[in-house]
Each structure stands twice: as C-alpha cells, then as structure tokens.
Image (tube, grey):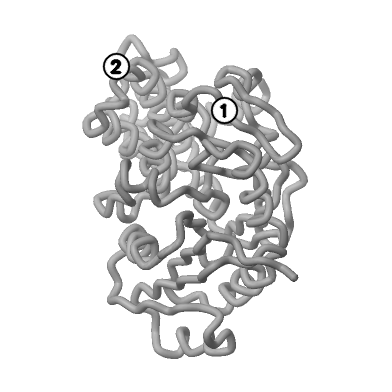
Amino acid sequence: MRRDSDISVVIPMYNRADLMIETLEAVLSQTMPPAAVIVVDDGSTEEEVAKLQRFGAAIQIVRQHNQGVQRARNVGIQRATTSWVALCDTDDVWQPDWLERIVALRSADPGIDFIFGNFRILRDDVIAEGTKFDDAPAGYWEAVGVERMPEGWAFGSSLAGSTFRWHPMFPSAMAFSKELLARTGAFDPKLNGRSNEDGEFTLRLLYQARAGAIPEARVTIRKHGENFSRDRLQNLIDEVWSLDFVKRNHPEARPYAGIIDQEIVKRRIAAANLAFVAHDHDLARRLIKSVAWKQRPLKLHLKRLVAALPDPVAIPANDFLQRIAERG
C-alpha cells in the first residue's frame, strides 16, 4: 500500500486550466502521494475553474481576486498544515517519483530543510536534451561542499553566494519545510511582474537553509513560444532590478556585495547588446549609460555611438556591425 507523504503541493492558477490538467494528473499520480493539493485560483474565469471539477475532492481550490503569483503562493502555503510544502506552477509536470525522491533525501539527511531538483525545458512541444544542471559552471557544486549520496546531494555550506552567478533553482522543482519558511518569510509581492521573482525568495531560503538537491531531472518546465531574444532581454533587465533590490534589502547579502555589483554590470552589458541587436536604440543607450565608462568594453562604446545616431543612419550602421560580428 502506498503511503502519503507529509508534503502539501501548492499550485497558483490564473486561467490556463487546459494545461493545468496535465500538471494535476502528474501531481496526483505520484508514487508517494501528497498529503494535500492546494490550487490557489488568482482571479480566473468561472469557465476555467469549472474545468478542474473532474478532480473533485482530490484537490482544494482556494479562490481570490487577481493579486499576482506571489500572493497566490503565499495563500496556499498558509493553508498547508503539513511540515513541508512543494511548489508547482500551472503548466509544469513532475515525474511520478518526484515527491518520493524528496522524502528519500530527507530521510538520508534529516537536517535538510530545502530541496531543489534538476529539470528539463519543454518548448513548443520539444523537450531539451540537456538539463539545467548540465549548465553548471566548472567546480560549481564542489565549491559549496557537495556530498553525493544515492538518494541525492547535500551541501555543506550555503549556495547563496554562488547563485548570484548561476541560479539552478525553479519553483516547480523545489520543496521546503514550513519551519524554514517561518524564519525566512514567504514570497514578496513587491516583486510582482518580475520574471525572476522566485529568485529573491530562494535567496532568503538559502541564507539559512541546509540545502539538498535531486541531480536527476525529474521535473519538466514548460516554456511557451515567445520571442526568445526579447524574452531574454526582459529577463536580464528584471535580474538587474532584483539584484539591486537584494543588495538594498537583504542584510545577509552584504558579504556578497562585490559579486552582486559584478553581476549587475555583466547583465546590463548583456541586455544592452541584446537591445542593440533588436534595433531598440533608445533602450540600448539607457542601458549603456547605466554602465560606468571604465567598465564598458570597447565594442560597447562603439555601439553607444551608433545608437546615438538618427535611425536612418543608425539602423544600417547597426546592421553593418552585426555582419562584421557574425564573420568573427
């Protein structure tokens, strides 16, 4: 007989019920079922919510007017009566043993109070061959004292500083204890609308957590068919905003101030380059201006000059520079 876990699953919802059906089927088909599945509807239409009736009493639906994903997650977490909470977004999918793997790692190292897992990206119905952890910089895991066990990994020191350079966590592939959350606080609604709002929350967990990881990709994260370049540009702008927010508002981030400043400059330069490629010269100028003169690469100085020209001149000059760059 299967035994239930001591984990509640919290899923924020804003319409997209058709995609959420697959998500819920995966959650409810776990080899170690969740103790509760709490769906927080954040202002969906009646028609969308009605599509979930097929699940009956297997899920709890909490309804509120639209307030953003952070508040929706917080409401679900508050409703959870279990000692642990796992997050899942509306259109992501777990492999059947995801919760069982979390419980097994906790049993192997009872001190762990935050677990994140590897995942793959599904974009336009094509699943990526590589996983998120495949992108880890050389020596990343060793730098934080990873202990590799059959059940998963445990870390001897905080990953907080490392995540400023490379962030391997995603909400649908993380779980944490309610006791840890009581010390760190829940999601901050001030970050509503930022593409990486979960990163600030994860940092607050990592400052105090003993973290563990599931290295095998047991979660699939769905990405939709947006313009990838434009999507990446907005992500970089949001990351800059969030890093600055963390620097100003997290006392625990003070030891990492130098790293944060480096990463802000790196992302501003990357965003300026993407804006330039997209012929968004106004945004490119503003981003370049935000980088100190001495920190700008030579090519960025040249792009600033081009972006300052009238469009009839700037656009062909931009295209010329891009053709030169493509030739190496």
Rendering coords of residue 183 (x, y %): 31, 42
Q: Quadrant of the C terminus?
A: top right
Q: Mark 1 packing: few (<14 Cα in 10 Å), some, or many (20+)?
A: many
Residue 292: give its label.
2
Q: Nearer the viewer, residue 127 or 71?
A: 71
Q: Quadrant of residue 33?
A: bottom right
- Picture layout, residue 179 above or below residue 82: above
* Residue 104 relative to residue 243: left or right: right
Q: Quadrant of the N terminus?
A: bottom right
SS under mark 1: strand
What residue appears at the point 60 percent right and 77 percent down from the top-left corner?
21
What residue appears at the point 65 percent right and 47 percent down from the top-left corner?
119
- Picture layout, residue 248 above or below residue 261: below
What residue appears at the point 34 percent right and 63 percent down from the top-left corner?
78
Disc 1 versus disc 2: nearer the observer: 1
- Picture layout, residue 130 above or below residue 160: below
Q: Is residue 183 visible?
A: yes
Q: Mark 2 packing: few (<14 Cα in 10 Å), some, or many (20+)?
A: few
Q: Earlier in the sequence, mark 1 or mark 2?
A: 1
Q: Looking at the picture, which amino acid does disc 1 mark? A: Phe
Q: Nearer the viewer, residue 277 or 292?
A: 292
What residue appears at the point 71 percent right and 59 percent down from the top-left corner?
95
Give the residue furthest to the top: 294
Rendering coords of residue 170 (x, y %): 52, 47
Q: Is residue 312 visible?
A: no
Q: Quadrant of residue 263?
A: top left
Q: Looking at the picture, which amino acid does disc 2 mark? A: Ala
Rendering coords of residue 118 (x, y %): 65, 43
Residue under pointer 1: 155
Label count reads: 2
Q: Quadrant of residue 35?
A: bottom right
* Residue 148 relative to residue 269: left or right: right
